[in-house]
């Protein structure tokens, strides 16, 4: 394949889609093609649809057991509040998805980003396009992040819809016991959604780095999930409290600060700063690996 021909068309095997990258505007077209590939992959669509069912199933379960005192014993406070106000079903759904399902979403997006293309034998053709490897890597990172944010948004929207139908939307009682108007409560819940989405960016970059190390996408997916699980386990061990502030998942549940009368911006900023640190470290490693690797597949 000549350089000109490869700049015209790259056919992605296994995804059932063609990716077009013209001579001009190659970067923008490459990003659009990558987004179509990630968002259009049937497996990803089915998984996101399944995520959207989580708030519905959770809401129905809470609705059916709302009058049973024994059902709420030992349950997180967010679940109890969701039965009083549908707004909290958004937060409760994200709380339930954050330990495993959302990391799995990241793994699905990142596992195929580089390892999937290498396994399919299309990566080497992609790299002969008139776009540098750095831009290719950034494009894949952006596409993976967009997919993850779409998944978070789907959980939030379905949680709001299910909560409104099952429990109604009312003025919000914060964790401190103070009641705020519905509009302010919705703004705080939006802050929760945005914070959860941003908190996953570090794992996206970690997953992308792992994806550059192997040509087996399943291995990259598993390794990405393992990183989040191990971080969560280490964060729960008091003996390792010295390293807790540096663990990827340590501030994931800091979104609760938005539900207090005075938002704990110190916790929020620490969580965001931690994500930036992980992005810088593993983004650099991913860049170093991807730009220097001898791509033969």
Image (cartoon, grey):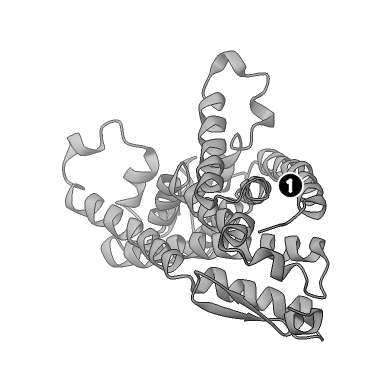
SS at circle 1: helix
From what the image shows, is residue 130 above or below residue 66?
below
Q: Quadrant of residue 19?
A: bottom right
Residue 260, image x, y percentages: 55, 43
Q: How many marks?
A: 1
Question: What is the quadrant of the N terminus in the image?
Answer: bottom right
From what the image shows, is residue 132 above or below residue 270?
below
In the image: residue 35, left or right of residue 5: left
Q: Which residue shows up at 69% across the image and 74% down it?
A: 31
Give the residue pinned by disc 1.
279
Residue 130, image x, y percentages: 82, 75
In the image: residue 176, left or right of residue 7: left
Along the viewing direction, whichever of 170 and 224 lies nearer the viewer = 224
Q: Can I make out residue 260 in this image?
A: no
Q: Quadrant of residue 295?
A: bottom right
Along the viewing direction, whichever of 109 and 101 lies nearer the viewer = 109
Q: Which residue shows up at 66% across the image and 44% down it?
A: 268
Q: Which residue shows up at 70% across the image and 44% down it?
A: 275
Q: Can I make out residue 268 in this image?
A: yes
Question: What is the quadrant of the C terminus in the image?
Answer: bottom right
Q: Which residue shows up at 83% across the image and 67% down it?
A: 132
Label 1 Cα crowd, 10 Å radius (few <14 / some 14-19 / many 20+): some
Along the viewing direction, whichever of 50 and 97 lies nearer the viewer = 50
From what the image shows, is residue 136 above or below residue 65?
below
Residue 184, image x, y percentages: 54, 60
Along the viewing direction, whichever of 230 and 268 lies nearer the viewer = 230
From what the image shows, is residue 239 above or below residue 126?
above
Residue 95, image x, y percentages: 44, 46
């Amino acid at each position: 394949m000549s350089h000109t021909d490869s700049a015209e068309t790259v056919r992605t095997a296994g995804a059932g889609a063609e990716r077009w990258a013209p001579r001009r505007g190659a970067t923008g077209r490459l990003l659009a093609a990558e987004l179509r590939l990630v968002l259009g992959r049937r497996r990803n669509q089915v998984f996101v649809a399944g995520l959207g069912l989580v708030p519905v199933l959770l809401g129905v379960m809470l609705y059916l057991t709302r009058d049973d005192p024994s059902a709420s014993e030992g349950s997180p406070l967010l679940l109890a509040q969701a039965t009083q106000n549908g707004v909290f079903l958004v937060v409760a759904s994200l709380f339930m998805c954050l330990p495993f399902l959302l990391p799995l979403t990241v793994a699905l997006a990142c596992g195929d980003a580089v390892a999937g293309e290498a396994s399919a034998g299309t990566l080497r053709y992609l790299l002969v396009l008139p776009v540098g490897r750095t831009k290719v890597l950034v494009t894949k990172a952006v596409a993976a992040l967009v997919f993850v944010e779409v998944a978070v948004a789907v959980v939030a929207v379905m949680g709001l819809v299910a909560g409104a139908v099952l429990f109604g939307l009312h003025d919000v009682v914060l964790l401190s016991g103070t009641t705020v108007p519905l509009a302010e409560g919705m703004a705080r819940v939006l802050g929760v959604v945005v914070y959860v989405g941003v908190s996953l960016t570090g794992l996206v970059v970690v997953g992308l780095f792992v994806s550059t190390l192997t040509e087996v996408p399943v291995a990259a997916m598993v390794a990405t999930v393992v990183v989040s699980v191990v971080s969560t386990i280490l964060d729960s061990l008091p003996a390792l409290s010295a390293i807790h502030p540096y663990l990827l998942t340590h501030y994931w549940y800091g979104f609760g600060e938005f539900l207090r009368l005075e938002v704990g911006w110190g916790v929020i900023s620490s969580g965001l700063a931690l994500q930036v640190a992980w992005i810088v470290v593993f983004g650099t490693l991913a860049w170093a690996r991807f730009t220097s690797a001898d791509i033969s597949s």
